[in-house]
Amino acid sequence: MRAVGAAIAIALVVIAGVALPPYYEEVLVDGLINAVFAVSLNLLLGYTGLPSLGHAAYFASGAYAAGLVSLHVTHSFWIGALSGTAAGAILGAIFGVVALRTKGAYFLMITLALGQIAWAVAYSWRDVTGGDDGLRGIPAPDIGLSIVHLDGPRLYFVLTLIALVATLAATRLLVGSPFGRTLRGIKDNSVRMGALGYNVWLHRYLAFVMASAGAGFAGVLFVYHKGFVSPDVAHVVTSAQAMLMVILGGAGTLWGPVAGAMTITVLGNFASTYTLHWTLILGLLYIGVVLIAPTGIISVLARPKGSR
Amino acid sequence: MTMQAGERRALLGPNGSGKTTLFNMIGGQTKPTSGKIFLFGNNATDDPPHRRAHSGLSRTFQITSLFPNLSVVENIHLAVMAPSPIRYAPHRAAESYPGIMREVEELLADWRFAGSRERLVRDLSYGDQRKLEIAMALAHRPRLLLLDEPTAGLSAAETSDLIEVIKAPGPEVSILMIEHDVDVALDVADRISILDRGRIVAEGTAIEVRSNQAVQAIYFGGS
């Protein structure tokens, strides 16, 4: 049943991407990139139970790294993607040591602070990041197939769709693996996990680094899509929006963050054309979800068998 | 306080005497302000709980500590995986390890949980939860098992079932048990330690402890 639903969802997105005019395709690609970002945050928030409010730091790290590689080294998509993902992972490895000294609300605050540090570095390190001007004129990436160049929005749409599907497949494998099971155990009762013999800190740290790598990858997709990156991508607002996407769609489910990301991206784009108050609508939407369906859209649509 | 290998020791004492605190120090959940913990001859005072588990320590908690939002089989699976290096494997399905899955099935059968394997732990009866916690504590064949008030809140029938379970393991498992029910303690234990206000005030066989005047004062009031 789930596979059929997933196939239908992908098919709908593909049809939308092919049938709609280029502006809408742009919005869809934004949604797909946000979905990759939200899926990476879900690993921390939904599966491990670590509420990070600074996940944009790793997204930015990936975006800037890929942007710099593209401007100064090579147009190769693969090298840029590898650099960006690694940049996300490395920053996660460093920040994770600090963040994981805390839990719960303190973790939320520390990750927020670390995210703002990343924003401040992006803002002030003009020589490398371009400061508040950011990096501009990043060329379309070369995926190494001579007949295909990704300067057409249609082809970039296909690339981001494939990237999302690959990210989801990797996440599904991870969640069903022994390591994934330990994360769920840690979320449910970390004291019991420690008493059973699990090194809770180490499992959390590894999850943190993996999630940061995923965010870095999303940053890579972002910078090649826009051709531009500025410090805003590291800001707490970006982190908070990702958190809302995960929660709205359903934390701890595979498709929840995708649904949340697509919904918020699409709604946000259309609402912004009619009103200046999109963030107000977003806030009300969030309140609505928390009151009516706190486990998110996906959990409501796919009521689990058993207890209810 | 010292225990011999294979011993069954009951830890008794009035409320607030520090029994669970002692357990938390042996288990590593709390750091002692002074003194040392030696497990199996090694100084474990600075070891985190997971390292103590790997050296052979296992425990239950005063308030049942399981994974309430996971099913019975998922709970047992986590207990079985704990000592194995595969717990770090990110690339294969958890069910694809036949050795682990066989152990899980054996435990489900031995402890008679096969019928409720898919039930969420939070939907189990209190007695079943207590039983599951002990099953999981014994899953990786510990050398020392700490039981914190295992029969608390159980009916008479459930209590006698649980006592059989506790008496079942052989001398390769040492058991240290906190109990309020003196009859249960006497049934299971070879030796008894009495704790009062953070100090061991008496230790010995049941007969020795019963006739100890300090113990009588604690339980029945001073003269």
Image (spheres, coloured by chain):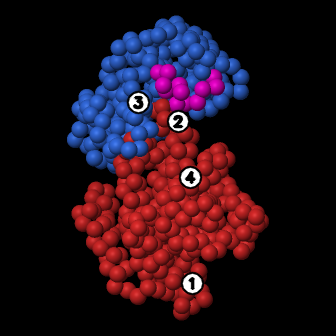
Chain colours: A red, B blue
Image quadrant in which you'd find residue B94? top left
Residue in the image at 40% along x and 78% along y: A154
Q: Is residue B110 above or below residue A287?
A: above
Please check whether the numbered discs 4 and 2 fall on a single chain: yes
Residue B182 falls inside the magenta stretch: no
Where the N terminus of chain A falls, by quadrant? bottom left
Give amino acid for label 4. Answer: Ala
Q: Which residue is mark 1?
A: A278
Query: Which of pointers 3 and 4 indicates the residue nearer the eye?
Result: 4
Q: Which residue is mark 3?
A: B84
Please check whether the numbered discs 2 and 1 fall on a single chain: yes
The dot on residue A199 is: 2
Estimate how packed mark 2 is, as few (under 14), some (14 to 19) or many (20 or more) residues with alpha carbons within 10 Å.
Answer: some
Q: Point out residue A153 in the picture as x, y percentages from the top left corner.
A: 45, 78
Q: Write down the region rendered in magenta.
A: B45-56
Residue B149 lies left or right of residue A305; in this view the side is right
Estimate how packed mark 1 is, as few (under 14), some (14 to 19) or many (20 or more) residues with alpha carbons within 10 Å.
Answer: some
Badge 1 sits on which subunit?
A: A
Between marks 3 and 1, how big is the CA–CA gap? 50 Å
Residue A303 lies left or right of residue A212; in this view the side is left
Q: Point out residue A280 in the picture as x, y percentages from the top left corner.
A: 59, 82
